[in-house]
Amino acid sequence: MTEIGIFLSSEEHGPNDLVRMAQQAESEGFRSVAVSDHFHPWIDRQGESPFVWNVIGGIASTTQLRITTAVTCPTMRTHPAVIAQAAATSAVMAPGRFRLGVGTGENLNEHILGDRWPAADERMEMLEEAVEVMRELWKGKITDHEGKHYKVVNARIYSLPDEAPPVLVSGFGPKATSMAARIGDGYVSTAPEPDLPNQYSQEGGRGPKVALMKVCWDEDEAKARKTAFELWPSTGVPGELSQELPMPGHFEQASEKVTEDDVAEKIVCGPDPQRHLEMINKYIAAGYDEIYVGQVGPETAGMVDFYHREILPKVA
């Protein structure tokens, strides 16, 4: 059975609002939450970008939701040893309920320390080594690591959960999906297409296949379309640009020719339950085990109530 969770956009909401949204989602039948991890929003109009680990602490201590980062980049702006400690603490606060979603990141977030932005193949190599470092640290022993990309000296994590958190790996192309199948405890992607989820399974990938899906619920469909277009024109930015552009202003420039219709083709807008169910069914048909649905814009409370009444019972 496919699980429907709530996806919270750190790019649009402050930390206290994110915690309140998670609490409401739990009260209306959701059992799991995914939270994005950014330093910058995609565009300035989105307006927020809190530190995800504080948010996770708030959600962990006030709900019983399963929590997944969607996704964290443990390679550049934050050393994998530090992410290992943050994830271990989160797993202690949410015993058996925390999963670390990881990916190779975007220049948008990772350039802030002035480091060179590596090519995709090198970023995948860095991520694989980072996951190795984190898993070694989660054993609770004094750890030394001298790798191609990372060095760890006499490091030990003392606050550890009973079991190491699962590591879910994102993959938006065949190479990254192969890596996810090789090193991941699960898979994360966004497209309602079967090719990559099938590849993950065929190459021996284990654990859940997780999809992230945006919607813009509003009683007024025209208003929903306008909101989605104003806040997420970057949905229409093609190819690898989303990994390469360094600043929100560059995403605004790259989105100048994106139209409202372009965005509405990818983000379900409005109050029609059938359209929401049709998109969810595309993800189910593509082979995903879990679908995390994120509201675009300020109407998260209305969207959560709508899904509680109109969507969750029909999917179940």
Image (tube, rainbow, N blue to C red):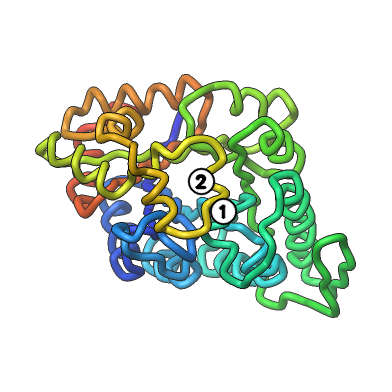
**How many numbered markers are drawn?**
2
Residue visible at 32% across and 28% down in the picture: 265
Residue topped by disc 1: 106
Quadrant where the C terminus sits is top left
Real-space Cα separation, disc 2 to disc 1, in angstroms? 7 Å
| Residue 135 locus on image (x, y percent) | 76, 59
Q: Quadrant of residue 249?
A: bottom left
Can you say whether 169 is above or below 154 in the image?
above
Q: Is residue 124 visible?
A: yes
Mark 2 or mark 1: name the one nearer the start of the chain: 1
Residue visible at 79% across and 55% down in the picture: 129
Can you say whether 185 is above or below 59 in the image?
above
Q: Quadrant of residue 149?
A: bottom right
Residue visible at 89% across and 67% down in the picture: 146
Horizontal placement of 267 versus 224: left or right?
right
Horizontal placement of 45 versus 155: left or right?
left
Judged from the image, the secondary structure of the residue bearing numbered disc 2 is helix
| Amino acid of disc 1 | Glu
| Residue 152 locus on image (x, y percent) | 82, 73
Q: Which mark is residue 242?
A: 2
| Amino acid of disc 2 | Ser
| Residue 198 locus on image (x, y percent) | 62, 23
Residue visible at 74% across and 27% down in the picture: 203
